Structure formats: structure tokens, C-alpha cells
Amino acid sequence: MSPPSSMDAAEIAELRLDIYALLGPITSFISSAIHSETALLTHMLSVEELLVSLHLMANKIHPRVFDAIVQPILCLEARLHEIKRAGHIEEDAATGSREWVRTEAGQMKIHLPVDLLIELLELGFSDKDSALFLGCSERTLRRRRVELDLQRWNDRDLSDEELSSIITQLQTMHSEDVGERGTWGALRSQGLRISRARLRRIVQATDPISQNPRWARHLKRRQYYVPFVNSLWHMDGHHKLIKWKIVIHGAIDGKSRLVTFLRASSNNRANTVAALFLEAVQARGSPSRVRGDHGGENMGVLKLMEEYRGFGRGSFIQGPSTRNQRIERLWVDVQKWTTKKYRAWFEHLEEMRVLDVDCDVHLWALHFVFLPQLNGALEHFVRMWNNHKMRTPGLGNQTPEQMFLQGAWDAARRGYDVGLLDMAERAAMQEVGLDIEGWEDYGLDGWRSERQGEQPHVRVDRISERVPPVLNEPSTHAALRLLLPYPPFPPPADFGLTAYLDVLDAINDLI
């Protein structure tokens, strides 16, 4: 016999109304003709948070009632994933492409996205680094800050706790939920300029479902936990540039959130990923465990981990990307600050009819010119990410680099070979009330629905194997390299267009 429900009929009715109010905008988004990339991500996160909370409330709701509540939400989640897989998504403005707008006085000036500029200031990036991200000069960026009255230290001194209190106070002034945009506008009206990313994070931390206080007593979200730095690396591939045969492979330490490697390659082979992994191991030490998906590109790392750390202990934990939240969250920022501009630029080259994605020679030239530049941009991203202060509560406002070093020193002081002793890891987890029988749930932010089956391997052959042999000769590389800007990053004023056209002309002369 099923256990009796601990929620009465009135509470169930209120719960359904709250869920209906939350899902209304998501349903409208799905039925609309245009799907914004940012809105899609926001709605997917909202649905995941809702399912997490309902799952933790399952013992308070009769099973039949619970199933009736959850099934429509799962259907909406499936629809959102279909939209993502179909790729019919409207790109947000590219952060790195130069967009010119005309002022009221008739002058032309570079358009800088205000919200992204505010977010860079919040993260503590210098004007020089912010200018690199936004594709403008330091002088232009400083002038725009003055125009927008954005002081460098304006809101970074405002703690999350203080901001949360202000938001709560603003919400009590309205009889109904005014939404994210309304709250953001209310803050700006009081002279507080924060990014929507920070606003969304604080609102979700306050109440991941809604602003309705009667939910709070039912919700307790499972917190991410791994005991040490190098206990668990999260590894994955980023395929936003797959159309141009470019794949970005990366990994992040679960404890400190330090990016251990991030590199763009012209193939998706296991030996390429394994080489990047070994390079990171030499620099940061070997992880105890790695979490990745079932893709064939991860088989090299799986073999290395099982040979070095052992079999049957979760040395390489395979599962769908939905259970790899640390690296999935990193991809959001990688796309926002780096890959989006290159995707927009490559599409622009196609529109100019100087790039044909079905022509192997064109793709070879694209890789030759822009892969070094893209990897320079990724190195810049990693440097900035690893050295920016994390705002997450309990992390002491430290950078990932600081947390990684501190964690390594702490493990050495306690006599641990970081990430090696299973008994030490299990003991540390039991101290915080976690007891995991197997490792399939190790290093998760919370419960999430699973996609069925394994992820198919994304095959990307080397373009170098499909072009005339002369293009692979060292002498050819040396001659063509003279046409490239040095250093490759920051990019030149034309973003590498002249170099690309010169390389194409030189190749035509060769073949």
C-alpha cells in the first residue's frame, strides 16, 4: 500500500497553480516561431530546477498525484531538448564581432552590449581584458563606461547577501511576481546596475522555483560535493563550431572549478583528447576520477585512467552530459565570451563567398589561419576564468587558482596523495553526510532527468588527410606561416580576413 500523502488537497492545489504559473512562459516560448538561445538555456535550467525540487518532495505526495504533476513537465523538457537538437535557434548578438550603430548626432560608434559589459565589471576583469572580450579598444571601453555611468567598483562591493535583501524588499512592493526583467529594471531605477546573469543566479539561490514562500519549507537541494582538488575532473567536448570541423575539448576540476585544459582541434579523435589530458596532468597532477560521456573521443582518457588508477573504482565515470553540470555550465561562458564571435565570423565569411564548407581546401585554410587565433582566445579565457573571484557562497571570494593551490597544500599537509586514496575520499564524504555505494552519482549538483541511451560519437576527420599532399609539407607550412599575423591573438583589426585571403591565393598558386 502506498504511504499516505503528507500534503493535503489544498496544498496540492496551490502547488499545481505555482507550477502552472512557472511553466506558462516556457509553453509560450515553445509555441513561438523564434527561439532565442539565451531564453532556451534559461527555460531548460528552470525546468531542471523544478524537477529537482519535485523529486525531493516525492515522499510528501501520493505517487499517482506525483506522476500526474511530473509527466507534463517531462514532456516540456523533452520539447526543449528537441529545439536544442534541431538547431533552430536565433543567435544572440555576437560579443566579439564589431557592430556599428549611428548615434542621434549622426556619428557612427561601436555597439557594446551593456549587460555583458556590466558582467565583465562584476567579474573583476580589467579594461584591457574586457576590451579583448568585446572586440574594441581600451579607450572605447572606458569612454562607454563613462557614458553609461558604470564605475569600476560600483556594484562589486555589494555582496550577494545585500543584493538578495534588496531584491526581496523590491518584490514585497508588488502584489505579483514582476519577473526577471521587472526586477532588473527596478534595480536600475535605484542606481544599481547588475548583469542579468548575476540577478538570475541570486534569485535562484534564494528560491530555485519561484518567489512563493510556501515552497521553501518543502525544498532542500542536494549540494555539489567532492572532497579534494583533483578528486574529480569533468571533461567534455564543445561542438558549436562543428560545421567548420572544429571541436573544443575541455576539463574542469570539480572542487576548485579550475579549468585544467581547453583547446580547439581540427578533429575529434581519442588520441587528440588523450594528449590534451596528459598535458594537463603534467601541469596540474593526475585526477582520481574523471567524469565524461560515452563518446568515442573519451576512450583514450578512459584507458589511461583505468591503467593508472585502477579498474572497478569509478576511475572514469561515464554518463550523459546532463549529469556533467560543472563542464556544461563552463560551456555557457565559453560560448558567450569566445566561440560565439568565431561562429558569427565564419558565417560572415560564407556570406562573403570566400568560404565554402564543402571545400576541403577552404576548411584547411580556415584552420591554418584561425585555429591559432581561436586557441589564443581560449587561452585568454582560461587565464581570466582561473584568476577571477568566485561569488559562490562558502568559497571565500577566492579564485579557482587560489582554491586549487590551497586544496593541494591542504591535502599535502594532511599527508594525502590528492585524489589517490579511496578510503580518504570516502571518509571525507561521510563526514558531510554523503555515503555513495557506487560512483555513478559522484559529483552531481542534483537530480536530473536522463536522456536514454548513449551519446553517439561525433566523427570529425582530419582535413589534412583530404587535401593535396603539398599542403602537408613542412616547407609549405613555413611559407604560409609568413602570411599570418604574429602573435595570432589578439586578432588584427580585420579579424584575420587579409591573412585568410592571402593564404587562399597562395594555395591556389601551389595546386
Image: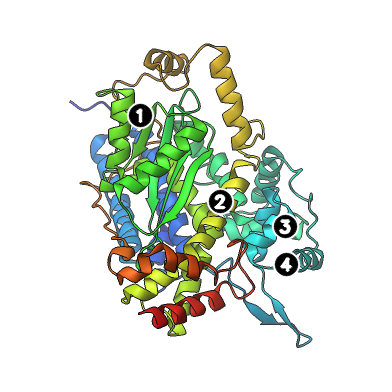
Q: Kindly state the secondary structure of the residue where label 2 is placed.
A: helix
Q: Kindly state the secondary structure of the residue where label 3 is placed.
A: helix
Q: Position of residue 446 (x, y in %)?
A: 40, 36
What kind of residue is marked 2? Glu
Q: CA distance from mark 2 to mark 4?
A: 20 Å
Give the mark count.
Answer: 4
Q: Kindly state the secondary structure of the residue where label 1 is placed.
A: loop
Q: Kindly state the secondary structure of the residue where label 4 is placed.
A: loop
Q: Residue at x 60, y 52 (%)?
A: 380
Label 4 near label 2: C-beta < 8 Å?
A: no
Dot 3: within a 10 Å radius of its alpha carbon, few (fewer than 14), some, or many (20 or more) residues?
A: some
Residue underneath mark 2: 379
| Left or right: 203 in relation to 358 | right
Q: CA distance from mark 3 to mark 2?
A: 15 Å
Residue underneath mark 3: 128
> Upstream in the sequence, badge 2 or badge 1?
1
Residue underneath mark 4: 137
Q: Residue at x 58, y 66 (%)?
A: 95
Instruction: Say which mark, if any, is on residue 6.
Output: 1
Foreground disc of the pair 3, 2: 2
Q: Position of residue 304 (x, y in %)?
A: 31, 33
Asked whether residue 21 is in view, the answer is no
